[in-house]
Amino acid sequence: MPQPRTRLLDLALPVILIAIWVGVIFAKTPEEIVHVPEGKPVMVDGKIGLEEWSDAAEVKIPGGARLYMKTSGGFVYVAVQFPAGRSGFTDVYIASEDGNIHDLHASAKLGERQLEGGQWPPWSNWWNNQGWVANVSQVESFEKKTFFPAAVREYQIARSRFAGREWRLMLDMSMESQGGQYTVVRFPASGSDSNPEKWLRVQFGP
């Protein structure tokens, strides 16, 4: 049976309400290192299959969301599982060892942008993703611009795309709220999108 209808990001981003969850961080603190293990490749289809992520590093996020990470065959796999009953889209921020900071966006569209001079450029170019892919929202109705709920966002990122054995990583989960607006939940909650100092440290093997 069709799932309930929901509206997602269109070409012009809707007004977004920023809400930072405050509370105990159940995951590793930014000062700790999340060691990303080698595992099996996954199908990037927006579904958490049985045992599909059992060999990944798991980070529990306050409120019930989860972040999974592993490597396989020269790729980094990242999965963001929204809290039960919630759906939306994601921005995965990566700061690599060469000092560059990128935002990898996955909603009904894929897009990336790079921090320049401490500022993020506006979203103007879509489908410019290089060296990575993610699942996108499935259209329910083109006429009404509605999409099926997306409770999971999965990314496949080439290790060679971002320099170094250690990345800093931050996540924005944009969850649909009433009235077609979105509430952004950031993890780590104290992170800044222009300074990776308080982001998660994720480290890969050789």
Image: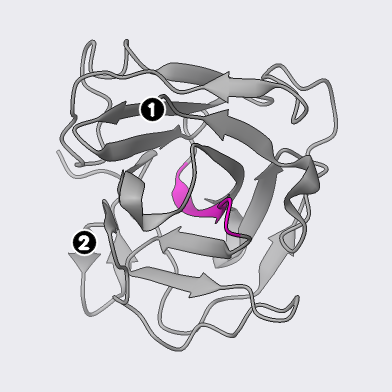
Between circles 2 and 1, the one closer to the viewer is 1
Q: Is residue 91 magenta?
A: yes
Q: Secondary structure at mark 2?
A: strand
Q: Is residue 187 above or below residue 65?
A: below
**Residue corresponding to mark 1:** 206
At a point 45% along the width and 60% down the height, the residue shown is: 104
Q: Residue at x 39, y 39 (%)?
A: 151
Which residue type carries mark 1?
Pro
Q: Amino acid at mark 2?
A: Glu
User: 176 or 191, which is in the foreground?
Assistant: 191
Q: Quadrant of the C terminus?
A: top left
Q: In this image, 11 relative to 54: left or right?
A: right
Identify the residue position indicated by label 2 in the image. Answer: 140
Q: Residues within 10 Å of mark 2 (few under 14, many from 20)?
A: some
Q: Position of residue 127 (x, y in %)?
A: 29, 75
- In the rendered image, residue 135, in percent from the top left (x then y), is placed at 26, 51
**Stretch of the chain drawn in magenta:** 87-98
Q: Is residue 166 magenta?
A: no
- The total of numbered circles placed on residues is 2
Query: How far apart in space, not on screen, are marks 2 and 1 (Cα)?
Result: 43 Å
Q: In the current view of this chain or complex, which residue is farthest to the bottom?
A: 124
Q: Residue furthest front?
A: 206
Q: Main secondary structure of the magenta part?
A: strand
Q: Within the image, what quadrant is residue 77 found in?
A: top left
Residue in the image at 27% along x and 40% along y = 75
Secondary structure under tag 1 reads loop
The x and y percentages for residue 162 are: 43, 54
